[in-house]
C-alpha cells in the first residue's frame, strides 16, 4: 500500500478530512466537541502546562499501516532538519519541560536521529521513542538500535495491534507480526522489558477495526500471558488507544461504511473524566518543519497553533501554557470510554 | 427493487434503553440487574461476555449476536475463542435435542415395538 498522498487521494487533504467529520456529525445530529466540553464545564480547553515535548521528526516510514494517522510510508519525504532539532533542544532545556517524546513515521530513519537523542540525553530529560519494531530488522544501519536505546536509557514505546498474527498483519502489513516478535526478542536481550533492568518497553494496543479498546488491564494481562507463553517475550505496560477517525483510518471507515457508526460510538462514549486529562493539556507537538500543534492529531489535520507563538524557534513556555487548545470532532477519539492518549487509558 | 422488510433492524439495538418508556420501574430493575450480572465477579466480564455470545447464538437473537460479537472483540477475545464459544452453544443445543430422544426411546419400548 502507498500513502494517501502518493495515491493522490482526496483524503490526503486535511480540509477534506475535517469536512467529512463535520458533514457526518451534522447528518447524524451529533453535538460538536466544543459543545460537549461546554456541558462538562471544560471549555475553552487550556493546558495544565507543557511537560512533554512530542517531536515528529518526519513522515518517512518503512511500514504503511492501514490505520496510520500520519499517512506515513516509504514514499513520504518530509524530514525534520538538524537546525529544527537544535531548536527543539533549546525548548527542551526549559525548566518544567520534563520529557522528549520522539515520533514519526519511523523516527530512526531521520539521518540526524541518533545525534538528536545523544544531545537530548545530555540535558538529563526523559526520552521516549515511538519505535515500530520492524525498523530494528531493516538492515545493518539499524541493527544496533537496541544497544543505542539502552545506552541513553530511552523508554521504548511500540505498537503491537494484537498478540496474534492475523489481526496484526491485517493492520500493519504481511509479516509484521513475526518481525515484531523478533524485534521484541532483541529488545529483551539487552534488558528492555525485563524487571530490574530499569529499561522500559511499553506496548501500544489499538483496535484493528471499527471498535473501541476494551479494558486496558485485562488486555495487558492477555498480551503478557500470550507473548510470554507462546513467544517468550516480555514487556512492561500496555497502552490501549482509540483509533482516530482521520487519515488512513478514516479511509478504511469510509470504505467499509463504518464512519457513521464509529463517530456515533465515540460521541455516545464521551467521558467527562477522560476529557479533563487529554494529552494536549500537558504536551506540545512539533511538526517536521518546526510548526507547533496541540497534539500529533491536530498536526496531521494541519490545525496549527497560531497564537503569539507558532514555531518551536519562538518557544515560550508561559505563553504556550496559557493558550487555547484547538478542537474538532476527531477529539471525541480522546474522550471515549476510558479515554485515550499516547500513554493509554486516562480515566 | 422490492422494499426490504424485516422485523429486525440493526439501528433498533440502540433503542434497547427506550423499553422503559411505558414501564420505567420494571425496566430500571431489569437494567440494574443486567449491569450487575455482567460486572466483574467470580467470572471476569470477558468470560461473561463469551457466555453471552454463546447464549445469543442458541436463542438466536440477532441484536445480542451483534452486541456481544463487538463486546468480545473489544475485550480482546481471539477469533478462536469466539468460535469455540459458539460451538459450545451448538453442542449444548444439539445435545439437548438428542438427549430428549431418550423419551422417544422409552415410548417406543412402552409401545412394545
Ligand atoms: S502507524 Fe507508525 S509504523 Fe505504521 S505507517 Fe504509521 S508511522 Fe509507520
Ligand atoms: S485530538 Fe488532540 S486536541 Fe483533541 S482532545 Fe485529543 S489531544 Fe486534545
Image (cartoon, grey):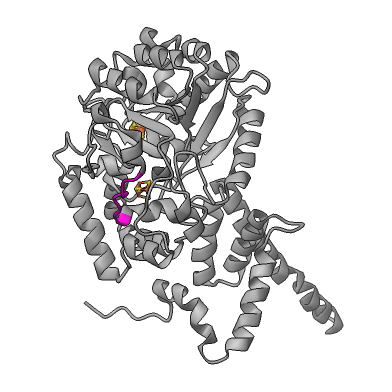
Residue A1 vertical placement versus A151 (above, below):
below
Query: In the figure, is residue B26 to the left or right of A6?
Result: right
Instruction: Residue B106: give x, y in percent of width and height.
Output: 83, 78
Chief secondary structure of the magenta span? loop
Q: Nearer the viewer, residue A204 or A286?
A: A286
Residue B98 seen in this snapshot: yes
Instruction: Residue A325: give x, y in percent of width and height.
Output: 32, 49
Q: Is A93 colored magenta in this rendering?
A: no
Residue A66 seen in this snapshot: no
Residue A28: quadrant of the picture: bottom left
Residue B98: quadrant of the picture: bottom right
Q: Is A326 colored magenta in this rendering?
A: yes
Q: How many marks?
A: 0
Residue name at image x 49 percent, y 65 percent: B66
Residue name at image x 36 percent, y 59 percent: A43
Give the residue furthest to the bottom. B22
The magenta region covers A322-329
Q: Nearer the viewer, residue A325 or A344?
A: A325
Q: Nearer the viewer, residue A147 or A75?
A: A147
* Quadrant placement of the N terminus of chain A: top left
Residue B109 vertical placement versus A119 (above, below):
below
Residue A17 vertical placement versus A22 (above, below):
above
Instruction: Residue A321: give x, y in percent of width and height.
Output: 36, 41
Quarter of image, ligand 1: top left
Amino acid at each position: 500500500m502507498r500513502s494517501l498522498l502518493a495515491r493522490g487521494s482526496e483524503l490526503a487533504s486535511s480540509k477534506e478530512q475535517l469536512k467529512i467529520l463535520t458533514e457526518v456529525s451534522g447528518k447524524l445530529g451529533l453535538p460538536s466537541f466544543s459543545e460537549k466540553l461546554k456541558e462538562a464545564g471544560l471549555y475553552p480547553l487550556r493546558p495544565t502546562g507543557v511537560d512533554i515535548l512530542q517531536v515528529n521528526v518526519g513522515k518517512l516510514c518503512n511500514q504503511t499501516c492501514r490505520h496510520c494517522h500520519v499517512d506515513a510510508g516509504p514514499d513520504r519525504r518530509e524530514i525534520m532538519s538538524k537546525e529544527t532539532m537544535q531548536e527543539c533542544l533549546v525548548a527542551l532545556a526549559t525548566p518544567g519541560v520534563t520529557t522528549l517524546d520522539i515520533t514519526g513515521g519511523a523516527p530512526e530513519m531521520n539521518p540526524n536521529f541518533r545525534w538528536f537523542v545523544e544531545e537530548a540525553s545530555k540535558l538529563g530529560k526523559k526520552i521516549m521513542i515511538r519505535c515500530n519494531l520492524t525498523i530494528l530488522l531493516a538492515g545493518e544501519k539499524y541493527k544496533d538500535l537496541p544497544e543505542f536505546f539502552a545506552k541513553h536509557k530511552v523508554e521504548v514505546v511500540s505498537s503491537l495491534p494484537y498478540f496474534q498474527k492475523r489481526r496484526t498483519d491485517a493492520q500493519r502489513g504481511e509479516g509484521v507480526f513475526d518481525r515484531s516478535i523478533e524485534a521484541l526478542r532483541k529488545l529483551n536481550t539487552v534488558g528492555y522489558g525485563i524487571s530490574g533492568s530499569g529499561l522500559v518497553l511499553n506496548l501500544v494496543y489499538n483496535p484493528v477495526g471499527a471498535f473501541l479498546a476494551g479494558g486496558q488491564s485485562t488486555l495487558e494481562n492477555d498480551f503478557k500471558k500470550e507473548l510470554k507463553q507462546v513467544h517468550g517475550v516480555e514487556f512492561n505496560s500496555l497502552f490501549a488507544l482509540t483509533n482516530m477517525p482521520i487519515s488512513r483510518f478514516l479511509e478504511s471507515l469510509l470504505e467499509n461504511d463504518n464512519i457513521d457508526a464509529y463517530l456515533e460510538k465515540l460521541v455516545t462514549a464521551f467521558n467527562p473524566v477522560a476529557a479533563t486529562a487529554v494529552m494536549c493539556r500537558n504536551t506540545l507537538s512539533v511538526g517536521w518543519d518546526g510548526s507547533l500543534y496541540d497534539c500529533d492529531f491536530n498536526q496531521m489535520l494541519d490545525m496549527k497553533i497560531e497564537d503569539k507563538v507558532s514555531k518551536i524557534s519562538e518557544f515560550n513556555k508561559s505563553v504556550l501554557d496559557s493558550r487555547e487548545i484547538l478542537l474538532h470532532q476527531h477529539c471525541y477519539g480522546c474522550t471515549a470510554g476510558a479515554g485515550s492518549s499516547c500513554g493509554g487509558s486516562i480515566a | 427493487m422490492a422494499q426490504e422488510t424485516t422485523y429486525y433492524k440493526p439501528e433498533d439495538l440502540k433503542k434497547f434503553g427506550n423499553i422503559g418508556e411505558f414501564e420505567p420501574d420494571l425496566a430500571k430493575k431489569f437494567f440494574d440487574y443486567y449491569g450487575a450480572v455482567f460486572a466483574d465477579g467470580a467470572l471476569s466480564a470477558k468470560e461473561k461476555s463469551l457466555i453471552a455470545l454463546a447464549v445469543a447464538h442458541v436463542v438466536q437473537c440477532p441484536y445480542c449476536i451483534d452486541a456481544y460479537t463487538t463486546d468480545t472483540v473489544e475485550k480482546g477475545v481471539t477469533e478462536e475463542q469466539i468460535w469455540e464459544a459458539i460451538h459450545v452453544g451448538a453442542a449444548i443445543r444439539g445435545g439437548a435435542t438428542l438427549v430428549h430422544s431418550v423419551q422417544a426411546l422409552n415410548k417406543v419400548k412402552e409401545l412394545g415395538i
